[in-house]
Amino acid sequence: MARLASSGSVALLSALGVLACSSSSKDGGAGGGAGGSGGAGGTPITSYQGTHCDYVVPIAETVEEASLDAPDVGSEPTPRHVHVSWAGPSASSFAVNWSTGLDTKLSAVVFGTDQAAVQAADGPTEGVQVERGYTFQYGSTSPLFPNQSHRVHEAHVCGLTAATTYYYKVGGPGHWSPVYDVATAPEPLSAAPFRFAVSGDSRGDPGTFTALQQMILADGADFQVFTGDAVVVGANQDHWNAFFRGTTGSFGVEEALARIPFMSVNGNHEAFAFNYVAQFAFPPENREEYYSFSYANAFFVLLNDTVADKALLGKQGEYLRAQLGRLDRSKTHWVFAVHHRPLYTCSNHSPVDEQVASWEPIYDELGVDFVLAGHNHCYERSKPLKPGGVEVPLGTGTIHVTAGGAGAPLYGTGTDCPFEAITEKTRGYVSIDVDGKTLRYRALRLDGSEIESLTITK
């Protein structure tokens, strides 16, 4: 969504030549409505709220324009870069983003449980609903990358049934995307089995990222978390266009991203640039800089460790403690923390001392099972650890994973790291299956071979 970088990221953006701005927002109305001057198509808005959604998406004042779905059709009206995520509850909602040419404002999503009916529909019919989204345009966010105006569309669909596959298409009459499918999560706190994927650091190689996405889709992942550094420079829209247009053979990355909810953290290469925040829909708490979500009997907290103001690490520590402290661990059996920089690594980039000091004790005290990171372009898994790198039996400490092999140039790994269980200089991703109190973990290479696997039962 259209939110601006935090003060903690301004120095990082400035280093890349990004134009730092401030923003403010107001609460909006319901039912695809908006704040500002109202809900007419093309009318400027300051916020957006989907029908049945219990949250409001603020819109930065610095976008060139933001308006509700309107019938305007310009050049290149066919939706592209379609990708789904969650900004609301995973069991009852999904959000979808896409792009078009600058003059097209068709911003609707047609959805339902009958694929053929959705395919045929141009509007609401029996069993088919339409959610009105919104659209905005932004120009170059850095003087280093001029002439990069870009239009984003976004819609939030709420009030859905848990554990249900929905079919949807985005755009408007005469200019629809293909029909894709996306599934809602099981009922909250359910012990129903699910699978998710973990990858990171695709920057500079959308082909490898796309190949991994093809694997993740074929493997049946229900959703994925991404550990940051999707592109080389977060303020360069050309890099994002390449990311969203990746291909391998006849497979396009949209085939996966439009079906598998993609939940990401900010990396040092995104630098929380406006382009990054504008093109994804995450929970709007904390301007999407850090957030959390639940899926069945698991809880995920996603943090931003790439900040200029170290005080923000402490603020996120408070958020982390509050979010984890409210969980009923007799029902939420698995907890995962996700951020870009690893706390334990044997590769190029060493951990951030302030981050370790402020977050690791909370992970230990409140029982985080896995910390999922990237930054180092390799695969690493620690032994189960207590603070200070003290090894403990499997199932009693926190396991730290570096999954940074999604395309960026590979880094070597050291051998003299007593806290590590395994390291490998390789491209790949991690697949995690949760089935009640049993977790099966697999690390996979790009060629599909298995690096390792392990099972934990509580």
Image (tube, rainbow, N blue to C red):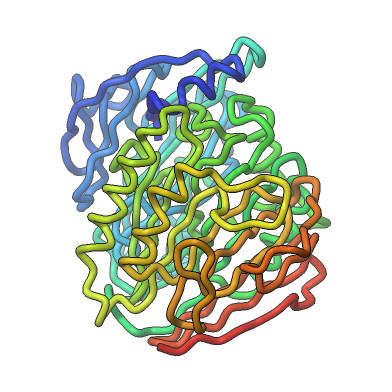
Is 70 situated above or below 387? above
Residue 68 placement: quadrant: top left
Residue depicted at 55% across the width and 48% down the height = 340
Picture quarter containing residue 373?
bottom right
* Residue at 49% from the left image edge and 47% from the top image edge: 265
Foreground pick, 77 / 312: 312
Label tally = 0
In this view, the residue in front, 313 or 29, is 313
Position of residue 271 measured from the top left corner of the image (x, y, whole percent): 54, 31
Q: Which residue is rendered at x = 44% and y = 86% of the image?
A: 435
In the picture shown, does residue 293 fall above or below 73? below
Taking the spot 43% from the left edge, 65% from the top edge, the residue there is 336
| Quarter occupied by the C terminus | bottom left
> In x, y percent, where is residue 370?
48, 68
Q: Nearer the viewer, residue 418 or 5?
A: 418
Q: Position of residue 328 (x, y in %)?
A: 22, 74
Residue 312 visible in the picture: yes
Query: Where does the image place residue 420, in percent across and percent down from the top left?
Result: 65, 68
Quarter of the image for residue 146 reads: top right
Q: Nearer the viewer, residue 13 or 274?
A: 13
Which part of the image, by quadrant, shows the N terminus? top left
Is residue 181 visible in the rendered structure shown here?
A: no
